[in-house]
Amino acid sequence: MLTGIRVTIVGGDARQLEVIRRLNDYDATLQLIGFDHWKQPPTGVRMSKLSAESIAYSDAVILPVVGTDDAGRIETSFCSDELVLTPVLIEALPQHARVYTGMAKPYLKQLCSNSTIHLTELLDRDDVAIYNSIPTAEGAIMMAIQNTDFTIHGSYSMVLGMGRTGLTMARTLKGMGSRVMAGVRKPEDFARALEAGYEPFYINQLQEMAEKVDLVFNTVPSLILTGECDRQAAAARADHRFGIPTRGDRFPLCGKKRN
């Protein structure tokens, strides 16, 4: 039981609703920030605005899967207000408080480090990351289907990164009949991708290889598919390119649908 433990949940999507219900079942004292549009929150849960005063007595703060962007903004599906995590807010936390997120970008890591607040990245755990890779792959494929007028079957797909999410992504695409190219950095990942039946290449060849594909799925936690890369690919192949981030990165769905 979590009786007496004060937990503040800031932002997030529908996944956070299940976290809230579970914590409520365990009798945690819950405060929700960024859930103004949630019509039926559990009884006894406190709804608040993001401020130093509101989080000052938290034992734990739970952020979305991608904690913040590079400017401290927190995504939320249930609030129209902009939520920004600032140094003032982190400094307001008691020293024993912990911040939990799926993966933290440098901004959040530096923020917590500066205030000596313990930060836990749940996706560092293999079991959590592997379980999470399943809805991540399905969601990315849904985006691809919604934004193209051709089938996954028979398409040329590129998956960047052969980590826990990348392996699930590539296997799912191949199972749907796509020809899968795998961008890797390490020789052992090259060998693993080849053994699995993908077409491996090293990421330093990305601009050249991007000319050949219809769909690009980036599972690397950084922006490596640049606008210049896409422009070069577009010039080489007019029916190309929908780039889809799967690790919290942001590049646009771009290019043209097939005619």
Image (cartoon, rainbow, N blue to C red):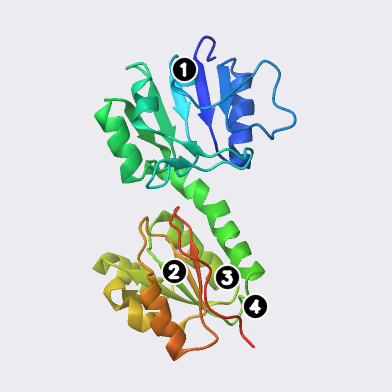
Which element type, helix, strand or loop, lies under badge 1?
Answer: helix
Disc number lying in front (3 or 4): 4
Q: Residues within 10 Å of mark 2 (few under 14, many from 20)?
A: many
The kind of residue on which mark 2 rests is Val
From the viewer's perspective, is 46 left or right of 106? Answer: right
Relative to 256, residue 171 above or below: above
Residue 210 placement (x, y as % from top left): 41, 80
Image-quadrant location for residue 145: bottom right
Residue tagged by mark 1? 53
* Rendered residue at 45%/46% (across/down): 129
The reply to whether the C-beta atoms of the residues labelled 3 and 2 are less than 8 Å apart is no
Which numbered disc flags the more N-terminal residue, 4 or 2? 4
Q: CA distance from mark 4 to mark 2?
A: 17 Å
The reply to whether the C-beta atoms of the residues labelled 4 and 2 are less than 8 Å apart is no
Residue 136 visible in rendering:
yes
Q: Which mark is residue 159?
A: 2
Residue 56 placement (x, y as % from top left): 43, 16
Q: CA distance from mark 1 to mark 2?
A: 44 Å
Q: CA distance from mark 3 to mark 4?
A: 13 Å
* Rendered residue at 39%/41% (across/down): 125
Q: CA distance from mark 1 to mark 4?
A: 51 Å
Residue 199 visible in rendering:
no
Name of the residue lying farthest toward the right: 39
Q: Nearer the viewer, residue 72 or 139?
A: 72
Residue tagged by mark 3? 175
Identify the image quadrant of the N terminus. top right
